[in-house]
Image: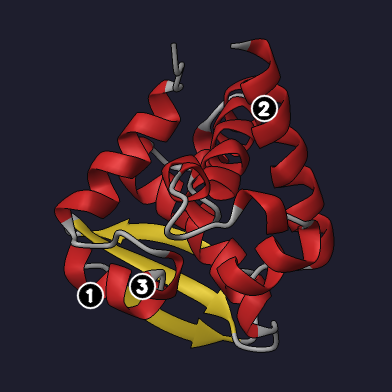
Amino acid sequence: MNYTTHTENFIKDLYTRMGILSPLQLDFQSIAMQLGIQLFYWPDKSQALFLNEHAYIFLNEELTNQQQWQDFCHELAHVLLHNGHQGRMSSLFREYQENKANNFMYHACIPSFMLDEPEHCDASNLTVQYVQQLFNVEYDFAVKRMNQYISNKQLF
């Protein structure tokens, strides 16, 4: 039996509806455009906001492409899963939203369904460096995500 989490299923459904089926198709500008999210670059911390029911993601322009991809997925979680102004929330609820966005980020940057597909990822070559390059993420990010992935596979 292959167990998947709600987050994994959500991301697989989202990407599949957009026609994103392989790691080479993971492009945050394209994803933002398909979802109708305005994307901006600025010198401040990356963040998402809503104005008149429209979503905006602001990415720090000084980050590497890998860091922007990771930040984009974190902010995408806020756009897709959260609402409300974090400045007006209790610190515990804000922390809950940030933890949820971080979990989403790891799965959106390196989707389990792509790791599961032999045509995308050669299991014999599934090293951290391979995953880092294939999914355009930082080394430490790839390490953490691979640990999550392997741990989940060992549980079920």
Q: Quadrant for residue 18, please give it.
A: bottom left
Disc 3 versus disc 1: distance between alpha carbons?
13 Å
Please name the residue shown 35% across and 50% down the image. Answer: 79
Disc 1 versus disc 2: distance between alpha carbons?
32 Å
Percent coordinates x, y for residue 102 in the rendering = 62, 42
Q: In the depicted view, which residue is nearer to us: 38 or 84?
A: 38
Q: Which mark is residue 154?
A: none
- The quarter of the picture where the N terminus appears is top left
User: Mark 2 and mark 1 in contact (Cβ < 8 Å)?
Assistant: no
Percent coordinates x, y for residue 86 in the rendering = 52, 40
Label 3 crowd bin: few (<14), some (14–19), many (20+), radius 10 Å? few
User: Mark 1 and mark 3 in contact (Cβ < 8 Å)?
Assistant: no
Percent coordinates x, y for residue 61 in the rendering = 61, 88
Q: Is residue 83 visible?
A: no
Q: Which mark is residue 91?
A: 2
Vertical side of 13 occupied by 135: above or below: below
Q: Quadrant for residue 25, please give it.
A: bottom left
Specify the amino acid type for callout 1: Met
Give the residue pinned by disc 1: 33
Foreground tag (1 vs 2):
1
Q: Secondary structure at mark 1?
A: helix
Q: In the depicted view, which residue is nearer to us: 15 or 98?
A: 15
Label 2 crowd bin: few (<14), some (14–19), many (20+), radius 10 Å? few
Specify the amino acid type for callout 3: Gln
Task: Please tell me how many numbered marks the rendered image carries.
Answer: 3
Vertical side of 44 occupied by 47: above or below: above
Q: Earlier in the sequence, mark 3 or mark 2?
A: 3
Q: Secondary structure at mark 2?
A: helix
Percent coordinates x, y for residue 35 in the rendering = 20, 62
The answer to whether 2 appears left or right of 143 in the picture is: left
Specify the amino acid type for callout 2: Ser
